[in-house]
Amino acid sequence: MSWNFLDVFDVVLNGLELLGSRSRSTSDRESLNYDEKPGKKESKRSRYFTEKVSVVLMVLAAFSFFIVFKDPLPVENYTQTLVVTSLIGVGISFVVFFILHVMELYYFKSIFKLLLFSCSVMGFFISVVMYIYFRSGWFI
């Protein structure tokens, strides 16, 4: 009869797994009280976190838009410049949304919260791109 070392090793490991799972399951049963419902995981974020972030972003966007549009803008290619800066801001917003989605932080319980947060982020990044474009002097 030919004995293979790996077959013996496999039998020993299976025995250890069986013993380990039996002792683990009894300790799990003792620690759980089946009469009580498991506790609900509490969120670390406050109740109105999404709304607070959205309001802060909208206030910053409004302030930035005010700074950009308080003086007259250059007349040359005015519409084209606004469209391009808006598209750049929306593109940056989509990158932020994708990163939040990958990190599993882009989850909302209602469509209102989704729209509020998404529109405020897009408005913020559009205003930041316009501020950088018109007030920095790099592109004009």
Image (cartoon, rainbow, N blue to C red):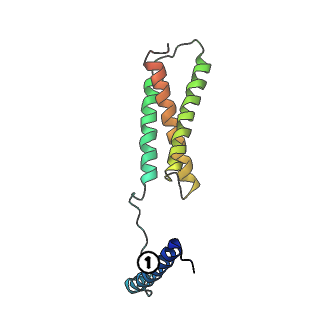
The residue closer to the viewer here, 38 or 124, is: 38
Please, what is the three-letter code of the amino acid marked with disc 1? Answer: Pro
Of all residues, the one furthest to the front in this rendering is 1
In this view, the residue in front, 100 or 118, is 100
Question: Is 42 on the left or on the right of 125, as rendered?
Answer: left
Residue under circle 1? 38
Residue 6 rendering spot, x and y as whole percentages:
51, 71
Residue 101's place in the image compared with 14, above or below, is: above
Label 1: few (<14), some or many (≥20) within 10 Å?
Answer: few
Kindly state the secondary structure of the residue where label 1 is placed: loop
All told, the count of numbered labels is 1
* Quadrant of the snapshot with the N terminus: bottom right
Residue 109 place in picture, x, y as percent: 54, 59
User: From what the image shows, is residue 76 above or below residue 133?
Assistant: above
Residue shown at 45% from the left, 50% from the top: 51
Residue 116 in the image: state x and y as whole percent: 53, 47
Residue 75 placed where, x, y %?
56, 12
Q: Residue at x 54, y 32 (%)?
A: 89
Give above or below for 123 relative to 137: below
Is residue 49 positioned above or below 23 on the image?
above
Kindly identify the residue that appears in the image at 45 percent across and 34 percent down.
Answer: 62
